[in-house]
Amino acid sequence: MEQTNPGVDLKEVRHVADLANLELTPEELPRMARDLNSILGHIAELNQLDTRDVPAMAQVSEALGLEPATSGQTLRPDAIRPSVDRKLVMAEAPETDGRFFKVPKVIER
Amino acid sequence: MPPATLNLETLTIAEARSAVLSGSVTASALAAQHYDRIAAVDPQINSFLALTRDRAILQAAKVDQAVKSGDTSTLGPLAGVPIGIKDVLVMQSAPSTAGSLILKGYHPPYDATAVAKLEAAGAILLGKLNCDEFAMGSSNENSAYGPVHNPRALDRVPGGSSGGSAASVAAGLCVASLGTDTGGSIRQPAAFCGVVGVLPTYGRVSRYGLIAFASSLDRVGPFTRSVADAATMLEVLAGPDTLDATASTQPVASYATDAAKPVAGLKIGVPEEYFGEGLNPEIRAAIEKSLDALKAQGCSIHKVSLPHTKYAVPTYYVICTAEASSNLSRMDGVRFGLRSEHSNTLANMYRESRDEGFGPEVKRRILLGTYVLSAGYYDAYYRKAQQVRTLLTRDFLTAFAEVDAIVCPVTPTPPWKLGEKTDDPIQMYLEDIYSVAASLAGICGISVPCGTTADGLPIGVQILAKHFDESTMFRVGSAIESAQQF
């Protein structure tokens, strides 16, 4: 069934922000709710179209009848080649011991 | 011999390369002239976020050495040509912020394939160019590092998201540049700044090293001062890549040769849906003039219909935000970029880092994308949009069964004033009306300057062609371009 929500309230915006790992300030929250509702209202125009028999298109290759990139045909040979320099990678980390990325503690004791 | 004085504002790739090869200017001197001009002019425009002077000097010296030794056979089609790179494409050891605070200070450990290919062809890479944060925007006002000003009218926007890429070429700060286009981000700023911008077919250019926004839509393409230059540059950029499985193995044509072929006999489609009431009359008149020029050169003009056009913007904003919400989850403060100092647990660290690092438009799109993918809404929004995407693509496939190329406006309006539309996201999104359908369908397109408004603001015409038929797109583009010159 294709039903679009008449609108999102502040509680829902907070829930979606949680899902997306976004922290919203009390000032941002109502503004985001207003913008989201205005955009969703515009998106609701898609319901004017009957799409019951229309296949969903995730990739351009599908529309062209080409093999999607994930079919294995375009995968490169499994050959050993140099990787990106580990030192350069670790140098970009906010916190590291040179071998691992360090993060704040995950479990409270 | 003193270095030749070249007009940096009009210099083309072909002219720059031949000046360097003939010895009338060294690649080093040409790069230095561009850096001097950047220092003098860019404070008003804000197109460069970082200069990669050391790398440019090294590369220029290599080109100059080859010229001096007389061994020019090793010099590629972009030898000595100063080029700028949009900041969403990574360049080893150069800052790559994607216009976001969350990547401030990030120095990627590798080169994007497109960047490496330009350099292998002899290009001198001058630096990184300003853009909307994570390429999300139509005015370049969403950059965390300040807006870019349109060089043709400093109080106006340059377009977005590749605003810096378009403005730098228009202002004579680099001969060409790389941009990216997800929903119009190359074509629209090209039109607003009066330069040429190419949206290659989806898969035509590798995206390895592109900081992803919406993976089923993102494309990398050139900004130049002529259609021939764009063809030269795309020939360098196009082709498969073992590092990007979505880069196509379709053969790459000789675009530069094909661009010069006559257009007589080509069938040109004009979609009525792109000439509706929202279209600025001066833009309409300029497009009609371009059509007259094509007719004069032997093209036949045909009405075509792209009946689902009005659904392109809502479809686009469901699909691109859904993909963005997923792609941007990697910005979490763990491996690179900003980490909030105000957090004591892992969960808080993610949230605080993202809150401090992302600007409002990025947050808005992540929220919308998360919402349309969330349980209970997936079918109503995301799946629905994917179905309409099929309809929009079929519109084009049907039209291209009848015509060789489609000619239409790039934008409904000329560039607006800075700050004019920042308050209402919908009003900003609707500016993408003529660009997003081609993005969703995966076809190729080019924006070519075709005149100015009475106020002197640039107007662009859009030429769309079938998947992997860039040759026809360039031919039609060249024909329109040649009609502009007196």
Image: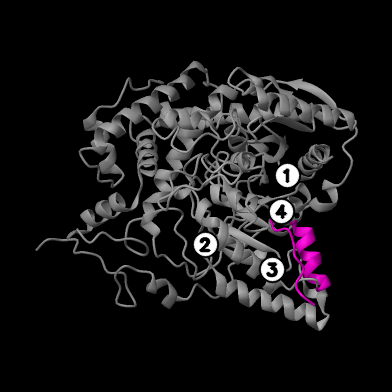
Answer with left or right where residue A49 lies relative to residue B235. Answer: left
CA gap, disc 2 to disc 1? 26 Å
Q: Which-is-in-front pick, marks 4 and 3? A: 3
Q: In which chain is the residue bearing label 4?
A: B
- Residue interval drawn in magenta: B1-23
- Label 3 or label 1, whichever lies nearer to me, is 3
Q: Residue at x 76, y 42 (%)?
A: B469
Distance from disc 3 to disc 2, alpha carbons, whole Å, reads 24 Å
User: In this rendering, which labeled residue sits more in front, label 2 or label 1?
Assistant: 2
Res. B90 mark:
2
Nearest to N terminus: mark 1 or mark 4: 4
Q: Is residue A76 visible?
A: no
- Callout 3: few (<14), some (14-19), or many (20+) C-alpha neighbours within 10 Å? many
Verify CB contact (< 8 Å) between mark 3 and mark 1. no
The disc at residue B19 is none
Observer-side mark, 1 or 4, equals 4
- Residue type at mark 4? Leu
Of mark 3 and mark 2, the one earlier in the sequence is: 3
Residue, x 29% and y 30% (percent of image)?
Answer: A33
Picture coordinates of residue B205, whole percent (x, y) = 65, 53
Residue positioned 35% across, 30% down in the render: A35
Across and down, in percent, residue A81 comes to 57, 74
**Label 3, on which residue?**
B30
Chain letter for mark 2, please: B
Which chain is indicated by disc 3? B
A105 vs B35, nearest the viewer: B35
- Residue pointed to by mark 1: B468
* Left or right, residue B11 beside residue B52: right
Q: Quadrant of residue A57?
A: top right
